[in-house]
Image: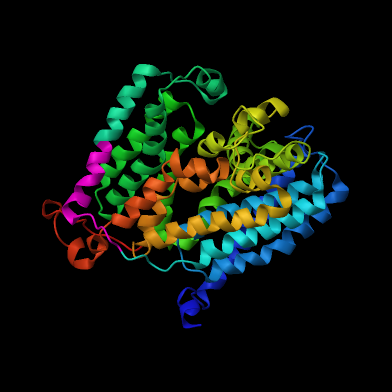
């Protein structure tokens, strides 16, 4: 019982977290109403005013889960879990406006149980793992600079294969032309999603602001090479997280990191509707942030439920290693299968859709979610003892990665597994006050903060 209490922080300040989370739920519902009202996903969802009450009730029924986020301590699972929680709430709204044919009631029960199965270990398992290997403090201090040099080299090599600066409207057209060798494809994803955010976190907590700024500039340079929205917006996202967590604690930062962008989108679309600002000025932002960043991961659950209710399950054969040893009903990646079946572009999706719905079906999806939650909990344990702000910033890009790709892909291709390893070997002594007071020449981080 005492161990359980040490994982929870009880008290009046947690009420602020709950109230802010509920405010975010309200804003998200307004945003989703705008999305469904303008028929953003024709043929998949459609507005029906008689179902608005049912959608609100579905969201309200699952909303008390925010209490867990109000009392749980911050961890990697807290960060990822809140984003997944909002994705599930989005699906509970969208399912009431579904035009697709599948068992909606079973899907609703399955996703709710999957949410609980994932969040339980992701929020509550945080006990540290004893470090068998610890990086020397001097090597740790030098590592962010080494990451910058290596990433710059990756940018240079990538530019030899593909370099084209285009706006978002032409991004998909030219991205189809990119042909990287395997090593470079992995290197660009791992550097931009894991290594550079890790370096940025090191620079921020040690107050090396110029190096932190250089890191963000280097991250932007990955965009003309990769032509992904993640590469373009990730540095701005990390900057937003760094600014917010300088003002408030990391759990509030987690909630605000979603609340603020969605709120701005709702305000802009409201101003468009009242004629205060031009249509394009508000809807470009709303379409990019509220629609693509927030609603699409929820919509993926809708699409995957429909497709795999009438087609064979993957039984995890989307993982290349499994495909080698077991028969697979699909010769193409699942995103390519979805692109052909629905007019929604290349449709990667989160672990709830891929490792859950597509791999094992709705009945066993909660068990898959539990397994994935335990993997995220491993990240909690490997990062335990590190300053919360350091964990938040070094993992700042990963919630968006995990919302849009399978967990297996995030662990390997996008560098999540490597980040787990870096957390594990990071010397905790580098963040102690005595170490923080030493100079960079002494090989220690300066001014480390617990966020």
Magenta highlight on residue 407: no
**Residue range of the region highlighted in magenta in the rendering:** 131-148
Residue depicted at x 50% and y 38%: 321
Query: Closest to the observer: 394 or 265?
Result: 394
Which quadrant would residue 272 be assigned to in this image?
top right
Magenta highlight on residue 139: yes
Q: Position of residue 178 (x, y in %)?
A: 47, 19
Image mark count: 0
Q: How is the image coloured?
A: rainbow
- Quadrant location of the C terminus in the rendered image: bottom left
Which quadrant would residue 25 be assigned to in this image?
bottom right
Q: Position of residue 101 (x, y in %)?
A: 83, 40
Query: Is residue 246 in sight in this rendering?
Result: no
| Left or right side of 200 for 381 | right
Q: Position of residue 160 (x, y in %)?
A: 34, 17
Q: Does the magenta stretch mainly form a helix, a strand or a loop?
A: helix
| Left or right side of 114 for 434 | left
Residue depicted at x 56% and y 72%: 15
Q: Position of residue 36 (x, y in %)?
A: 75, 41
Residue depicted at x 82% and y 47%: 103
| Residue farthest toward the left in the current orientation of the protein | 441
Which quadrant would residue 38 be assigned to in this image?
top right
| Left or right side of 87 for 96 | right
Query: Is residue 179 in sight in this rendering?
Result: yes
User: Up-down: is 285 above or below 5?
Assistant: above
| Left or right side of 125 for 265 | right
Residue depicted at x 52% and y 61%: 122
| Residue farthest toward the bottom in the current orientation of the protein | 2
User: Up-down: is 436 above or below 33?
Assistant: below
């Amino acid at each position: 019982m005492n161990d359980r209490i040490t994982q929870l922080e009880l008290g009046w300040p947690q009420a602020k977290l709950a109230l802010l989370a509920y405010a975010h739920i309200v804003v998200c519902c307004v945003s989703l109403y705008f999305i469904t009202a303008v028929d953003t996903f024709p043929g998949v969802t459609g507005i029906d005013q008689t179902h608005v009450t049912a959608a609100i009730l579905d969201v309200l029924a699952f909303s008390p889960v925010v209490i867990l986020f109000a009392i749980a301590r911050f961890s990697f699972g807290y960060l990822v879990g809140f984003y997944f929680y909002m994705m599930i709430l989005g699906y509970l709204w969208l399912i009431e406006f579904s035009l697709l044919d599948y068992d909606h009631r079973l899907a609703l029960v399955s996703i709710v149980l999957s949410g609980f199965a994932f969040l339980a270990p992701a929020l509550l398992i945080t006990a540290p793992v004893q470090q068998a290997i610890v990086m020397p403090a001097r090597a740790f201090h030098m590592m962010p600079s080494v990451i910058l040099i290596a990433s710059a080299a990756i940018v240079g090599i990538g530019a030899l294969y593909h370099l084209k600066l285009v706006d978002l409207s032409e991004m998909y057209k030219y991205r189809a032309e990119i042909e990287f060798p395997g090593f470079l494809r992995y290197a660009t994803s791992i550097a931009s999603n894991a290594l550079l955010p890790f370096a940025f976190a090191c620079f921020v907590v040690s107050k090396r602001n110029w190096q932190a700024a250089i890191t963000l500039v280097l991250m932007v340079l990955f965009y003309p090479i990769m032509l992904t929205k993640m590469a373009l917006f990730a540095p701005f996202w990390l900057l937003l997280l760094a600014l917010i967590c300088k003002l408030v604690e990391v759990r509030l930062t987690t909630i605000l990191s979603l609340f603020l962008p969605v709120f701005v989108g709702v305000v802009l679309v409201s101003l468009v509707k009242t004629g205060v600002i031009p249509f394009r000025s508000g809807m470009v932002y709303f379409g990019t942030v509220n629609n693509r960043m927030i609603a699409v991961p929820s919509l993926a659950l809708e699409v995957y439920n429909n497709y795999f209710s009438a087609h064979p399950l993957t039984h995890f054969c989307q993982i290349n290693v499994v495909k080698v040893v077991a028969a697979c009903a699909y010769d193409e990646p699942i995103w390519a299968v979805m692109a052909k079946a629905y007019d929604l572009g290349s449709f990667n999706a989160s672990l709830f859709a891929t490792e859950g719905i597509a791999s094992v079906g709705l009945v066993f999806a909660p068990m898959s979610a539990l397994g994935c939650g335990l993997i995220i909990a491993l990240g909690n344990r490997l990062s335990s003892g590190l300053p919360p702000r350091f964990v938040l910033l070094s993992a700042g890009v990963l919630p968006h990665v995990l919302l849009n790709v399978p967990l297996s892909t995030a662990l390997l291709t996008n560098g999540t597994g490597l980040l787990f390893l870096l957390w594990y070997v990071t010397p905790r002594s580098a963040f102690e006050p005595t170490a923080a007071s030493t100079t960079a020449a002494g090989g220690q981080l300066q001014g480390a903060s617990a966020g």
